[in-house]
């Protein structure tokens, strides 16, 4: 029968770029939550590591050999002698190169499956190291729980948010993360804001805060990659305009490096009606009505 895991979409409610390190990586501070849409990953134990990709977005995934599922599994195998693995079967549903961590979520799901197969704890430092080396978004996707993510993605602080009805929209155009960061034009070693100052100055609402408290706090924040991403792919601006024109929307913003954007609503019914209207007006777009949390 095999083991199965969901690879839930990651959404950056906020994203600040604090600077660029001398090694070329960018320091970030981001409030990350997870959506109720996901890829599906299964693992059938066997003697060889293999991957089969199917599903509605399978043709967008590129070469199987370059898939982050393979990378994560290989990195863990280097750290765990005698690691059992087998054939992964990925049902690809989420848009790719979309700013919602689809590939990272798949890699994290692979690590969770391998942990289950090999009786490893998810907090095993070897899993954490494999996740960090696979990609910046993989560590937060391993737990797939709301968190403030700092550094290059490896520093995580848990945070609890209320359930947020939402609409997610992707215009079905890929946006390369490296290209968006390059458009920022930061030199190696250029510091914009110290990460400690950001973490200390940004006081998110407490665990028992209302949805209204959270919406007010989120409206005071931003995604620093939104402007450079729109300069590369103007369709993102069209998506944001459409979301911001939806009845009942409280906040609309881009996630990650784009092109996926999200709108937050007070109720599931408002989100559903907005999604239906957006899909009717833009049948070529990927539109999902659901919730973040």
Image (cartoon, helix red, strand yellow):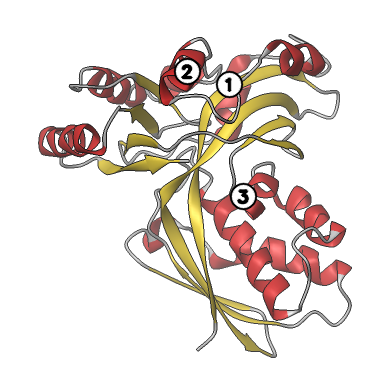
- Residue under numbered circle 2: 213
Q: Position of residue 38 (x, y in %)?
A: 43, 56
Q: Is residue 53 left or right of residue 244?
A: right
Farthest residue to the front: give it. 208
Q: Earlier in the sequence, mark 1 or mark 2?
A: 1
Residue 168 marker: none
Residue 141 marker: 3
> Residue drawn at (60%, 66%), measured in percent from left and top?
65
- CB under 8 Å between callouts 1 and 2? yes
Task: Note whether 38 is above or below 240 in the view shown.
Answer: below
Q: Residues within 10 Å of mark 1 (few under 14, many from 20)?
A: some
Asked whether 121 or 150 is in front, the reply is 121
- Residue under numbered circle 1: 205
Mark 3 → mark 2, Cα distance in angstroms? 26 Å
> Residue drawn at (66%, 49%), measured in percent from left and top?
138
Q: Position of residue 25 (x, y in %)?
A: 76, 30
Task: Note whether 85 is above or below 13 in the view shown.
Answer: below
Asked whether 250 or 180 is in front, the reply is 250
Q: Is residue 289 left or right of residue 277?
A: right
Mark 1 → mark 3, Cα distance in angstroms? 23 Å
């Amino acid at each position: 029968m095999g083991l199965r895991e969901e690879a839930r979409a990651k959404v950056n409610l906020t994203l600040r770029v604090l600077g660029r390190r001398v090694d070329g990586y960018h320091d970030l501070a981001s409030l990350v939550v997870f959506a109720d849409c996901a890829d599906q990953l299964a693992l059938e134990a066997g003697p060889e590591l293999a991957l089969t990709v199917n599903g509605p977005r399978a043709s967008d995934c590129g070469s199987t050999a370059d898939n982050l599922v393979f990378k994560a599994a290989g990195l863990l195998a280097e750290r765990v002698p005698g690691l059992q693995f087998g054939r992964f079967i990925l049902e690809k549903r989420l848009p790719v190169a979309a700013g919602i961590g689809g590939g990272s979520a798949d890699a994290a799901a692979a690590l969770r499956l391998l942990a289950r197969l090999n009786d490893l704890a998810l907090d095993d430092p070897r899993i954490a190291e494999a996740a960090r080396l696979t990609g910046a978004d993989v560590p937060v996707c391993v737990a797939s729980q709301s968190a403030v993510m700092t550094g290059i993605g490896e520093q995580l602080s848990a945070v609890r948010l209320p359930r947020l009805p939402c609409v997610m929209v992707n215009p079905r155009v890929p946006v390369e993360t490296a290209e968006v960061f390059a458009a920022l034009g930061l030199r190696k070693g250029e510091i914009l804001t110290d990460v400690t100052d950001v973490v200390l100055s940004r006081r998110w609402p407490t665990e028992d805060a209302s949805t209204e408290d959270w919406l007010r706090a989120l409206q005071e924040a931003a995604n620093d990659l939104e402007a450079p991403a729109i300069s590369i792919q103007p369709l993102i601006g069209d998506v944001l305009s459409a979301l911001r024109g939806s009845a009942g929307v409280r906040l609309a913003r881009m996630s990650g490096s784009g092109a996926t954007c999200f709108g937050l609503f007070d109720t599931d019914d408002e989100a559903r009606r907005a999604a239906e209207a957006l899909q009717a007006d833009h049948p070529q777009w990927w539109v999902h009505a659901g919730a973040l949390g």
